Image (cartoon, grey):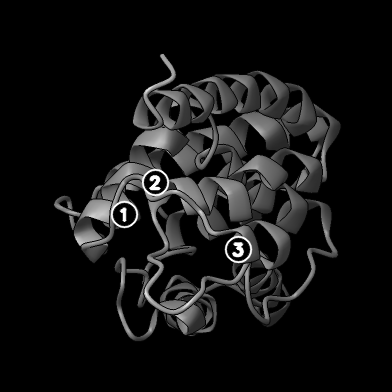
Protein backbone atom coordinates (compact mmCIF):
# COMPACT_ATOMS: atom_id res chain seq x y z
CA UNK A 1 0.00 0.00 0.00
CA UNK A 2 1.32 3.44 -0.91
CA UNK A 3 1.80 5.87 1.95
CA UNK A 4 2.25 9.57 2.57
CA UNK A 5 5.80 8.81 3.70
CA UNK A 6 6.60 7.47 0.23
CA UNK A 7 5.12 10.60 -1.33
CA UNK A 8 7.49 12.80 0.68
CA UNK A 9 10.35 11.68 -1.54
CA UNK A 10 8.40 12.39 -4.75
CA UNK A 11 7.47 16.02 -4.12
CA UNK A 12 9.55 19.12 -3.30
CA UNK A 13 8.76 20.64 0.08
CA UNK A 14 9.82 24.05 -1.26
CA UNK A 15 6.97 24.15 -3.82
CA UNK A 16 4.18 26.11 -2.13
CA UNK A 17 1.72 25.36 -4.93
CA UNK A 18 2.00 21.71 -6.01
CA UNK A 19 4.46 20.29 -3.49
CA UNK A 20 4.04 17.75 -0.70
CA UNK A 21 1.76 19.96 1.42
CA UNK A 22 -0.73 20.22 -1.45
CA UNK A 23 -0.64 16.47 -2.03
CA UNK A 24 -1.15 15.79 1.67
CA UNK A 25 -4.23 18.03 1.79
CA UNK A 26 -5.65 16.48 -1.37
CA UNK A 27 -5.00 13.00 0.04
CA UNK A 28 -6.98 13.63 3.20
CA UNK A 29 -9.77 15.47 1.39
CA UNK A 30 -10.05 12.72 -1.24
CA UNK A 31 -10.18 10.14 1.52
CA UNK A 32 -12.96 12.10 3.26
CA UNK A 33 -15.00 12.43 0.06
CA UNK A 34 -14.43 8.78 -0.88
CA UNK A 35 -15.79 7.58 2.46
CA UNK A 36 -18.89 9.76 2.12
CA UNK A 37 -19.51 8.91 -1.54
CA UNK A 38 -18.65 5.20 -1.35
CA UNK A 39 -15.66 5.27 -3.70
CA UNK A 40 -12.84 2.70 -3.78
CA UNK A 41 -10.45 4.02 -1.13
CA UNK A 42 -7.36 2.21 -2.38
CA UNK A 43 -7.68 3.69 -5.87
CA UNK A 44 -8.49 7.17 -4.56
CA UNK A 45 -5.59 7.19 -2.11
CA UNK A 46 -3.08 6.03 -4.74
CA UNK A 47 -4.34 8.58 -7.27
CA UNK A 48 -4.16 11.40 -4.73
CA UNK A 49 -0.57 10.54 -3.82
CA UNK A 50 0.54 10.37 -7.45
CA UNK A 51 -1.59 12.98 -9.25
CA UNK A 52 1.03 15.77 -9.43
CA UNK A 53 4.19 13.70 -9.19
CA UNK A 54 5.69 14.67 -12.58
CA UNK A 55 6.02 18.05 -14.28
CA UNK A 56 3.78 20.11 -11.99
CA UNK A 57 6.26 22.86 -11.07
CA UNK A 58 4.77 26.36 -11.41
CA UNK A 59 5.75 27.84 -14.73
CA UNK A 60 7.48 24.63 -15.79
CA UNK A 61 7.49 23.79 -19.50
CA UNK A 62 5.97 20.37 -18.78
CA UNK A 63 3.12 21.75 -16.65
CA UNK A 64 0.45 21.48 -19.39
CA UNK A 65 1.26 17.78 -19.78
CA UNK A 66 1.85 16.89 -16.14
CA UNK A 67 -1.33 14.79 -15.82
CA UNK A 68 -0.09 12.42 -18.56
CA UNK A 69 3.44 12.26 -17.17
CA UNK A 70 2.12 11.63 -13.67
CA UNK A 71 -0.15 8.85 -14.94
CA UNK A 72 2.85 7.17 -16.60
CA UNK A 73 4.90 7.45 -13.40
CA UNK A 74 1.96 6.02 -11.44
CA UNK A 75 1.90 2.95 -13.65
CA UNK A 76 5.58 2.29 -12.93
CA UNK A 77 5.08 2.63 -9.18
CA UNK A 78 1.95 0.49 -9.06
CA UNK A 79 3.43 -2.24 -11.24
CA UNK A 80 6.30 -2.42 -8.75
CA UNK A 81 3.72 -2.68 -5.96
CA UNK A 82 2.11 -5.67 -7.69
CA UNK A 83 -1.17 -4.03 -8.73
CA UNK A 84 -3.17 -5.63 -11.53
CA UNK A 85 -3.62 -3.86 -14.85
CA UNK A 86 -7.26 -2.98 -14.34
CA UNK A 87 -6.70 -1.17 -11.06
CA UNK A 88 -3.61 0.57 -12.42
CA UNK A 89 -5.72 1.82 -15.34
CA UNK A 90 -8.33 3.08 -12.87
CA UNK A 91 -5.71 5.12 -11.01
CA UNK A 92 -4.29 6.46 -14.27
CA UNK A 93 -7.73 7.61 -15.36
CA UNK A 94 -8.16 9.49 -12.07
CA UNK A 95 -4.83 11.25 -12.62
CA UNK A 96 -5.42 12.11 -16.27
CA UNK A 97 -8.91 13.42 -15.43
CA UNK A 98 -7.93 15.72 -12.55
CA UNK A 99 -6.73 18.64 -14.71
CA UNK A 100 -9.05 21.68 -14.97
CA UNK A 101 -7.49 23.10 -18.14
CA UNK A 102 -6.26 21.56 -21.35
CA UNK A 103 -6.86 18.11 -22.75
CA UNK A 104 -7.51 16.25 -19.52
CA UNK A 105 -10.06 13.46 -19.72
CA UNK A 106 -13.45 14.12 -18.17
CA UNK A 107 -13.83 12.14 -14.93
CA UNK A 108 -15.90 9.05 -15.72
CA UNK A 109 -15.60 6.97 -12.54
CA UNK A 110 -16.63 7.89 -9.01
CA UNK A 111 -12.98 7.66 -7.96
CA UNK A 112 -11.93 10.13 -10.68
CA UNK A 113 -14.70 12.50 -9.65
CA UNK A 114 -13.57 12.32 -6.03
CA UNK A 115 -9.95 13.13 -6.92
CA UNK A 116 -11.00 15.98 -9.21
CA UNK A 117 -13.16 17.49 -6.47
CA UNK A 118 -10.52 17.10 -3.76
CA UNK A 119 -7.89 18.73 -5.96
CA UNK A 120 -10.17 21.61 -6.92
CA UNK A 121 -11.24 22.27 -3.33
CA UNK A 122 -7.58 23.08 -2.72
CA UNK A 123 -7.78 26.07 -5.10
CA UNK A 124 -10.66 27.57 -3.14
CA UNK A 125 -10.91 29.24 0.27
CA UNK A 126 -7.98 30.50 2.30
CA UNK A 127 -5.59 27.83 1.02
CA UNK A 128 -6.57 28.35 -2.60
CA UNK A 129 -6.10 32.10 -2.33
CA UNK A 130 -2.66 31.64 -0.76
CA UNK A 131 -1.64 29.16 -3.46
CA UNK A 132 -2.79 31.49 -6.24
CA UNK A 133 -0.70 34.34 -4.83
CA UNK A 134 2.27 32.01 -4.33
CA UNK A 135 2.01 30.89 -7.95
CA UNK A 136 2.05 34.51 -9.15
CA UNK A 137 5.11 35.29 -7.04
CA UNK A 138 6.98 32.21 -8.28
CA UNK A 139 6.05 32.97 -11.90
CA UNK A 140 7.13 36.61 -11.53
CA UNK A 141 3.67 37.99 -12.28
CA UNK A 142 1.72 40.55 -10.20
CA UNK A 143 -0.70 39.71 -7.43
CA UNK A 144 -3.00 42.35 -8.91
CA UNK A 145 -3.28 44.14 -12.22
CA UNK A 146 -6.47 45.80 -13.33
CA UNK A 147 -7.93 43.59 -16.07
CA UNK A 148 -8.55 45.08 -19.49
CA UNK A 149 -12.07 45.20 -20.89
CA UNK A 150 -10.90 42.69 -23.51
CA UNK A 151 -9.88 40.23 -20.79
CA UNK A 152 -13.16 40.66 -18.94
CA UNK A 153 -15.07 39.92 -22.12
CA UNK A 154 -12.91 37.16 -23.60
CA UNK A 155 -10.58 35.81 -20.91
CA UNK A 156 -7.58 36.77 -23.06
CA UNK A 157 -5.05 39.47 -22.19
CA UNK A 158 -4.20 42.31 -24.54
CA UNK A 159 -0.51 42.86 -25.47
CA UNK A 160 1.42 43.97 -22.40
CA UNK A 161 -1.23 42.83 -19.94
CA UNK A 162 0.02 40.38 -17.34
CA UNK A 163 -1.98 37.45 -16.00
CA UNK A 164 -2.05 38.41 -12.32
CA UNK A 165 -3.43 36.40 -9.40
CA UNK A 166 -6.57 38.53 -9.73
CA UNK A 167 -6.83 37.56 -13.41
CA UNK A 168 -6.62 33.92 -12.38
CA UNK A 169 -9.45 34.45 -9.91
CA UNK A 170 -11.63 35.98 -12.62
CA UNK A 171 -10.65 33.47 -15.31
CA UNK A 172 -10.72 30.24 -13.31
CA UNK A 173 -11.19 30.29 -9.57
CA UNK A 174 -14.62 31.88 -9.34
CA UNK A 175 -15.95 29.14 -11.67
CA UNK A 176 -14.46 26.16 -9.86
CA UNK A 177 -17.29 25.54 -7.42
CA UNK A 178 -19.66 24.90 -10.33
CA UNK A 179 -17.40 22.14 -11.65
CA UNK A 180 -17.69 19.88 -8.60
CA UNK A 181 -18.98 16.38 -9.31
CA UNK A 182 -19.96 15.07 -5.89
CA UNK A 183 -22.62 16.36 -3.54
CA UNK A 184 -20.25 16.33 -0.56
CA UNK A 185 -17.68 18.46 -2.42
CA UNK A 186 -20.31 20.94 -3.60
CA UNK A 187 -21.28 21.67 0.00
CA UNK A 188 -17.65 22.32 0.98
CA UNK A 189 -17.02 24.37 -2.14
CA UNK A 190 -19.76 26.88 -1.35
CA UNK A 191 -18.13 27.95 1.92
CA UNK A 192 -14.64 28.08 0.46
CA UNK A 193 -15.87 29.98 -2.58
CA UNK A 194 -17.45 32.66 -0.38
CA UNK A 195 -14.21 33.17 1.56
CA UNK A 196 -12.18 33.45 -1.66
CA UNK A 197 -14.61 35.91 -3.28
CA UNK A 198 -14.52 38.11 -0.19
CA UNK A 199 -10.72 38.27 -0.35
CA UNK A 200 -10.45 39.11 -4.04
CA UNK A 201 -13.25 41.66 -3.91
CA UNK A 202 -11.46 43.34 -1.00
CA UNK A 203 -8.16 43.20 -2.91
CA UNK A 204 -9.74 44.82 -5.96
CA UNK A 205 -11.35 47.54 -3.85
CA UNK A 206 -8.12 48.33 -1.98
CA UNK A 207 -6.07 48.44 -5.17
CA UNK A 208 -8.56 50.89 -6.64
CA UNK A 209 -8.43 52.99 -3.45
CA UNK A 210 -12.09 52.38 -2.74
CA UNK A 211 -11.64 50.89 0.75
Of marks 3 and 2, which one's residue comes earlier in the chain? Answer: 2
Find residue 32 and name its label.
Answer: none
Distance Cα–Cα, label 1 vs label 3: 20 Å
Residue located 30% across and 54% down the image = 136
The furthest residue to the top: 211
Judging from the image, what secondary structure is the residue with disc 3 in?
A: helix
Give the vertical position of 61 relative to 196 (above or below). Answer: below
Find residue 132 and name its label.
Answer: 2
- Picture coordinates of residue 109 (x, y %)? 83, 60
Q: Are marks 3 and 2 in contact (CB under 8 Å)?
A: no
Picture quadrant where residue 124 is located: top right
| Label 2 neighbour load within 10 Å: few <14, some 14-19, many 20+ | many
Distance Cα–Cα, label 3 vs label 2: 18 Å
Residue at which label 3 appears: 151
- The reply to whether residue 116 is visible in this rendering is yes
- The reply to whether residue 9 is visible in this rendering is no
- Picture coordinates of residue 142 (x, y %)? 28, 53
Distance Cα–Cα, label 2 vs label 1: 5 Å
Residue at which label 1 appears: 135
| Label 1 neighbour load within 10 Å: few <14, some 14-19, many 20+ | many
Give the vertical position of 188 relative to 11 (above or below). Answer: above
Closer to the observer: label 3 or label 2?
A: 3
Q: Are marks 2 and 1 in contact (CB under 8 Å)?
A: yes
Residue located 63% across and 28% down the image = 193
Judging from the image, what secondary structure is the residue with disc 1 in?
A: helix
Q: In screen coordinates, is 68 left or right of 98?
A: left
Judging from the image, what secondary structure is the residue with disc 2 in?
A: helix
Of marks 1 and 3, which one's residue comes earlier in the chain? Answer: 1
Closer to the observer: label 1 or label 3?
A: 3
Q: In screen coordinates, is 27 left or right of 105?
A: left
- Picture coordinates of residue 19 (x, y %)? 29, 53
Residue located 31% across and 72% down the image = 59
Amino acid sequence: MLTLEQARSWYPHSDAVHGYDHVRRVYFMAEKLALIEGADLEIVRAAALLHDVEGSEPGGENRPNHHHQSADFAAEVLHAEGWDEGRIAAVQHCIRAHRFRGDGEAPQTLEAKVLFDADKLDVLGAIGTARTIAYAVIAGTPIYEQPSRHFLETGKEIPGEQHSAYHEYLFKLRRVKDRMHTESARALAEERHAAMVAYFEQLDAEMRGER
